[in-house]
Image (cartoon, coloured by chain):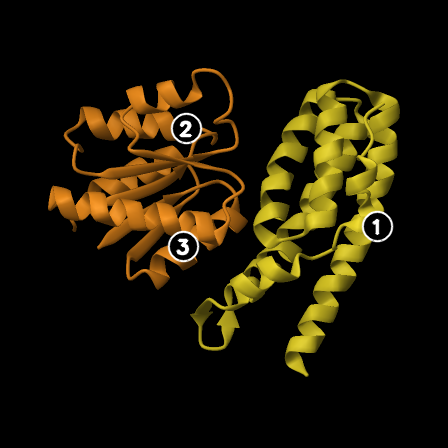
Chain colours: A orange, B yellow
Amino acid sequence: MKALVVDDDPIVRCVVRALLADAGYDVRCCCDGEEAWRVQSEFCASLIVSDWMMPVTDGLQLCSRIRSTGGDSVYFLLISSNLGAPQSKQRAYEAGVDDLLEKPVLPAALAEHLRRAKVAMLHQGGEN
Amino acid sequence: MNKVQESDSPSRIEVLDTRHIAQLQSLKVSGKTTLFNELSLIFRKEAPARMTHLREAIRAHDASEVAKLSHGFVGSLASLGARQMQALVKSLELAASADDWPAITVCLEQVEQAWKRLQRALEEHDQGAEA
């Protein structure tokens, strides 16, 4: 199982990477959406955990790009500190996001979302 | 002026959230290194630059930059479990969003004090772990 972590905050990257590694994923980390796009084209992660607000290419742009180029089986978990804002969730789901996690990223909450992702990916039968 | 609520006053909030840290320590990232050890290391490497940028933005009277920098910093502090400083930087973010410069000045002083306390707490934590 491969997972890609995308966040410009090294603390958040570290937390997400550690929990994914603990859950048995082969993990790679990127600092922004543009780098993630390049890495994903070779790494082909089945799970992407990405921040929304990032420099260069943000999380929503990354998700839309992946969906528009045949990446339908990738499970996309978007993390954001702005999910309470009007239409934020709607915009995220329209871009193809599978699940949303509110910042700050706390281990117990993230672990629960990762369990949910695993179940969805197993049902989809598309684990890499 | 935006102030930290009495019930959330800095003296009533733990510098480090012991329950959260226990969770981070339960996860080994390599050998004896726990997730908390790794986060603490990254934080101590990154945070001085963040504090410098905050001070510079305040000196430049750039409230939107102060709000943006504070917002990002709050997330890191929350993930680390640095509750007291998290609350104070959040107050700074709110003051900056409201363009409330008297409050920003007060908040910065409090953040500077909390920053010193947090550094001490992280050092003490490391020393305790080594003993």
Residue beneath label 3, please?
Answer: A17
| B128 relative to A125, above or below | below
Across and down, in percent, residue B49 comes to 68, 45
Badge 2 and badge 3 in a common chain: yes
Q: Residue at x 40, y 57 (%)?
A: A19
A48 relative position to A10: left or right: left
Badge 1 and badge 3 in a common chain: no
Residue B74 visible in the current orientation? yes
Across and down, in percent, residue B122 comes to 70, 63
Q: Residues within 10 Å of mark 2 (few under 14, many from 20)?
A: some
Q: Residue furthest left?
A: A125
Across and down, in percent, residue A67 comes to 21, 27
Q: Amino acid at mark 2?
A: Asp
Q: Residue furthest bottom?
A: B131
* Chain that bears disc 2: A
Across and down, in percent, residue B92 comes to 75, 32
Which numbered disc, 2 or 3, marks the residue that appears first in the sequence? 3
Q: Amino acid at mark 1?
A: Ser
Residue beneath label 1, please?
Answer: B11
| B37 relative to A2, above or below | below
Residue beneath label 2, please?
Answer: A58
Q: Residue at x 80, y 35 (%)?
A: B4
Q: CA distance from mark 1 to mark 3?
A: 33 Å
Is label 1 in a helix, a strand or a loop? helix
